[in-house]
Amino acid sequence: MKIKHLGAALLTLTASLFTSCQDDVSSQGSSLVSGEVTITVDSIPTFVPARSIEFDAYDSRSTTKLLGRINVPEYGDLSCSFLSQLYPAPTLGISDTVPESYIDSMKLVVSVPRGSLTGDSLAPQQLKVYRLNRQLPAGIVNNVNPADYYDASDPAALIGSQTYTLSALARNDSDLLKKDLNIVMRIPIPREKAIECVRAYRTNPAIFQWPATFAQSFPGIYVQQSFGNGCIGNVAAVGVQLYYRVDKTETSTDKETGETVTSTVATRDSVCLFATAPEVVSSNVISLQLSDYIKGLAQQGKSVITTPGGYCVDIDFPAQQIIDKYNQNSSMLTVVSSLSMEIPADKIKNDYGIGVAPFLLMVKKAEREKFFQNNKVPDQVESFYAKYDEDNKSYSFKTLRQYLLSLLQSGKQLTQEDVEFSLVPVKLTTDTVTNPYTNTSTVYVTRCANYIEKPTMTLLDTDNAIINFTYSKQEIE
């Protein structure tokens, strides 16, 4: 059996795209039939044509919401707020025997996991929460105008405001500082609104049975960054908490008389009536003004990717050159073993700790918008994903074999649509299944969405991508 690393021959065919590598030939083993098996392995630095593409509108629906504003010289000016419907509790959760006079207060609670931020956690900021007056569309995108869904001039539209920082150092209690996993902002809501909610639950409970019916009465909220600069936080949850008094009867025994004494003790309790949830429409409102530095890199022909939004990269995968090489050496017994592409990548230096995108999606450009609109996941034929390798500083798309086989089986002349791909930062949700018999695990991607969790800047070195192509051929004498 021969194992061959072919580079020079491939260089002759595609001098504009490939550089040479060493040839290595060795023979080992034997065959059940007369002849030999030749395994060809091409692993060579490759110039992959690429261009940075600016895109403004994208699906920004996410369970994570961004809030804040930063201005980074290398990155640009990023401003984030969000719109969201609220998921209602189907029942009040308070006994009918609790009178309205026992309703104490109501607060809108905004939670940010500790450390889930970009920038200076001590930067003072202020948020305002408004009630929406229009329904949010299911296909909402990031560049929607929030003013179309609420009226800032209406005093009744403002639910509340709060000044805050995203640092836990302001906590007075060191024990709570260690235990709390979230930075929590509590925005007071007038007690009259709490009374209205309790009455609505008790007189017309059907409103709260489904999110759609509740949205007709309460379309949702807009959380706006109204003051401050220097920090963006990832809001994990927003909820409306109702606080009320409960009378509890306690019994005790008098030590002197032995009599049983009954007393009523007032305690404070709370219940969450409404909250953000994956089941309702929730969308980030993101405005990114890219810096002149980033724009300059793109104009120079550099492959730049930013989040949230900004730039993605389109590439022309050298499928035709790979097919030509394969056809020159193929026979009836030629088998494609593997095909992968590794792209070197690195972060752009900055003082805000902005790193690279954790995952990249490689999807046919013609299918990019439909991919996200239809909530697709990588299928290893027209779409693939790669995780950033911090040690090797690269993204490696390892499962391109089926894509090549589909081109070979079609037998058609390749078009631009067949080879043009978009590289887009994504957030993946995965599920790992373990086979108890083989003790092996398989990772399945259950969701793939635009990455909007944090600002990132990624510089791809598409001039030095590495294409790994392996195929074997049985030669019978």
Image (cartoon, rainbow, N blue to C red):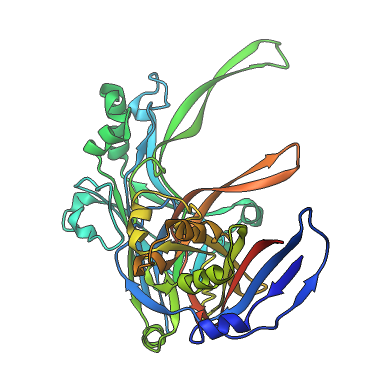
23 in relation to 209, above or below: below
* Residue at (30, 44) in percent of width and height: 190
Could you tell whether 22 is left or right of 70 in the image? right
**In the rendering, at what x and y percent does residue 219 appear?**
25, 43
Closer to the camera, 45 or 81? 45
**In the rendering, at what x and y percent does residue 407 appear?**
45, 60
Residue 159 appearing in the image: yes
* Residue at (75, 37) in percent of width and height: 437
Number of numbered callouts drawn = 0
Closer to the camera, 407 or 341? 407
Query: Which residue is at the far right?
Result: 29
* Residue at (38, 54) in percent of width and height: 371
**In the rendering, at what x and y percent does residue 429 appear?**
52, 50
Could you tell whether 25 is left or right of 135 in the image? right
**In the rendering, at what x and y percent does residue 194 appear?**
32, 37
Location of residue 212 (image quadrant): top left
Location of residue 152 (image quadrant): bottom left
Residue 397 appearing in the image: no
Closer to the camera, 433 or 107? 433
Location of residue 325 (image quadrant): bottom right
292 in relation to 266, above or below: below
218 in relation to 388, above or below: above
From the image, which quarter does the C terminus lie in?
A: bottom right
From the image, which quarter does the N terminus lie in?
A: bottom right
Could you tell whether 73 is left or right of 440 in the image? left
181 in relation to 273, above or below: below
